């Protein structure tokens, strides 16, 4: 059950923050100017990151220092993703260095998130192998989001990710944790607001830095749902594959569609694995409210 | 003469030994401190939470284990060390069990054990009661609590196991232990009720 205050702090406020940031990104003096592009490059990760952090604060409050539980580490991971997105926007480095830094952040995030299980459940070989496999999956997903940011114009990029975050929120909620579902819902609301603003600016181009927050936060939420709730492996795999479906809507014949029609195609394709992930999570469903 | 001296000494020695034995047998028996192991089959841990404004809700944990050191003559020498497996939670509804075990509440994969370890035990005001102070670790947070424990009985069972029983109930604020989800829909205050059955080693 979502109370009015949860809706206000966990949905409306993140949407407002992200929406304002995207407005800032799409209203430069001259849209084609280099200054406008630079502003867009940092405003989008800042807006999505701030919205995610605000949503986390609204849903669970601020984390303790150091974080005392895995859901609090999600806040730190969102902050790290925001910082990384800003760094990629403001100080671009070579492809190799970019991926070296991303790899460090992804592996660290997974290790911190899964620390209790690494300590008590997985052995010395199984644990690192599991983290490595998850890190490879998250990195592959990030690379696909980079490509999507390159190719999708206007609302396509945030709309497809909003569908992914929103559907993933439902799947995680059905698997036991409403709290994690609400955190995913906050990001979905932020991406939805970004898509709404971008709908009015269909020529808007996205930089790769826009991918940082969803590329790190969404896998972290799915991992939290899988290992601390009961999100099925099959749902996790489908959610991880969903960015590939979004990209399929931005290349080939579908890639030649206009920005708005293309956005609907990308969102529609994304919804296929997401709907399957939700359907597979249904048998593990939990009632909303005790 | 010499034989008489030996005879007197022998009688005196026997007499002293006899008195010693008498004195020893006449003094009250001092029972030593005894170790008891918690019997999970006959022990219960329930918790009660309010669902404002309607009702109260009860759930339980199946798996309680631990040790109790019981010294009938000296409460300060007693100790209690209990562990509850968090994933043994049972609320009579499989879906609700999943929700309660999730990060929203107990996060049992992250915090698999709930424990209590006494730090100080004193006699209570009433007969067979103890005031037990100790550290409760729940949801990864350790806080000191004080509770009144009543010894409900002690005797041999039909299988000749010597058993002792204890019960207590106490209230905590779950937010003190980092469990803040859904406060308002479910009360912050949670009452825990323990009935412990333990077998002497």
Image (tube, grey):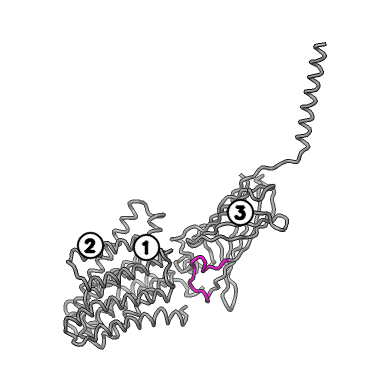
- Specify the subunit that label 2 lies on: A
Q: Nearer the viewer, residue A27 or A212?
A: A27
Q: Which mark is residue A100?
A: 2
Quick check: is B180 in the magenta stretch?
yes
Query: What is the spatial separation of the Cα atoms under label 1 and label 2, in whole angstroms?
Result: 20 Å
Mark 2 vs mark 3, foreground winner is 3
Location of mark 3 (residue)? B120
Which residue is at 53% across, 61% downward? B143
* Residue for point 41% across, 72% down: A173
Q: Up-down: is B164 above or below A227?
A: above
Q: Is residue B107 left or right of residue B59?
A: left
Which numbered disc, 1 or 3, marks the residue closer to the eye?
3
Which callout, 1 or 2, points to the residue nearer the camera? 2
Q: Secondary structure at mark 3?
A: strand
Query: In this figure, which residue is indicated by the disc labeled 1?
Result: A113
**For this rendering, which residue is in front, A103 or A154?**
A103
Identify the element where label 1 is drawn.
Answer: helix
Instruction: Residue B140: say if magenta.
Output: no
Q: Is residue B73 above or below residue A247?
A: above
Q: Which residues are magenta?
A: B172-185
Q: Are marks 2 and 3 in contact (CB under 8 Å)?
A: no
């Amino acid at each position: 059950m979502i109370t009015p205050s949860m809706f206000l702090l966990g949905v409306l406020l993140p949407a407002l923050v992200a929406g304002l940031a995207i407005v800032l990104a799409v209203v430069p003096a001259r849209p084609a100017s280099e200054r406008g592009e630079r502003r867009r490059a940092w405003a989008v990760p800042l807006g999505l990151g701030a919205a995610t952090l605000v949503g986390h604060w609204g849903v669970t409050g601020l984390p303790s220092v150091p974080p005392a539980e895995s859901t609090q580490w999600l806040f730190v991971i969102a902050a790290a993703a925001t910082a990384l997105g800003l760094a990629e926007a403001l100080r671009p480095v070579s492809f190799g260095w970019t991926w070296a830094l991303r790899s460090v952040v992804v592996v660290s995030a997974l290790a911190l998130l899964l620390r209790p299980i690494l300590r008590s459940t997985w052995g010395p070989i199984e644990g690192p192998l599991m983290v490595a496999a998850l890190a490879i999956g998250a990195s592959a997903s990030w690379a696909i989001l980079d490509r999507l940011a390159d190719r999708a114009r206007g609302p396509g990029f945030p709309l497809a990710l909003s569908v992914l975050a929103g559907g993933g929120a439902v799947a995680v909620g059905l698997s036991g944790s409403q709290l994690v579902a609400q955190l995913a819902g906050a990001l979905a609301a932020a991406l939805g607001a970004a898509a709404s603003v971008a709908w009015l600016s269909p020529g808007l181009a996205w930089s790769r830095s826009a991918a940082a927050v969803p590329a790190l936060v969404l896998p972290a939420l799915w991992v939290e749902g899988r290992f601390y709730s009961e999100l099925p492996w099959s749902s996790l795999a489908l959610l991880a594959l969903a960015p590939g479906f979004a990209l399929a809507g931005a290349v080939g014949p579908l890639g030649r569609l206009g920005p708005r029609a293309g956005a609907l195609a990308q969102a529609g394709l994304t919804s296929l694995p997401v709907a399957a992930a939700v359907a597979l999570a249904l048998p593990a469903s939990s009632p909303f409210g005790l | 003469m010499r034989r008489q001296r030996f005879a007197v000494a022998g009688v005196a020695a026997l007499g002293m030994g006899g008195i010693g034995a008498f004195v020893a047998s006449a003094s009250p028996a001092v029972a030593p401190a005894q170790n008891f192991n918690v019997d999970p089959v006959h022990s219960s841990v329930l918790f009660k939470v309010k669902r404002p404004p309607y009702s109260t809700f009860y759930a339980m944990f199946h798996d309680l284990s631990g040790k109790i050191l019981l010294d009938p003559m000296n409460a300060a020498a007693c100790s209690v060390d209990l562990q509850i497996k968090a994933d043994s939670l049972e609320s009579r509804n499989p879906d609700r069990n999943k929700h309660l075990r999730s990060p929203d509440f107990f996060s049992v994969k992250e915090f698999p054990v709930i424990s209590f370890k006494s730090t100080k035990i004193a006699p209570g005001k009433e007969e067979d009661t103890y005031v037990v102070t100790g550290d409760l670790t729940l949801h990864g947070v350790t806080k000191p609590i004080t509770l009144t424990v009543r010894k409900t009985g002690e005797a041999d069972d039909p299988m000749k196991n010597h058993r002792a029983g204890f019960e207590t109930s106490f209230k905590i604020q779950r937010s003190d232990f980092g469990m803040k989800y859904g406060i308002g829909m479910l009360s912050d205050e949670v009452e825990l009720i323990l009935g412990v059955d333990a077998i002497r080693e």
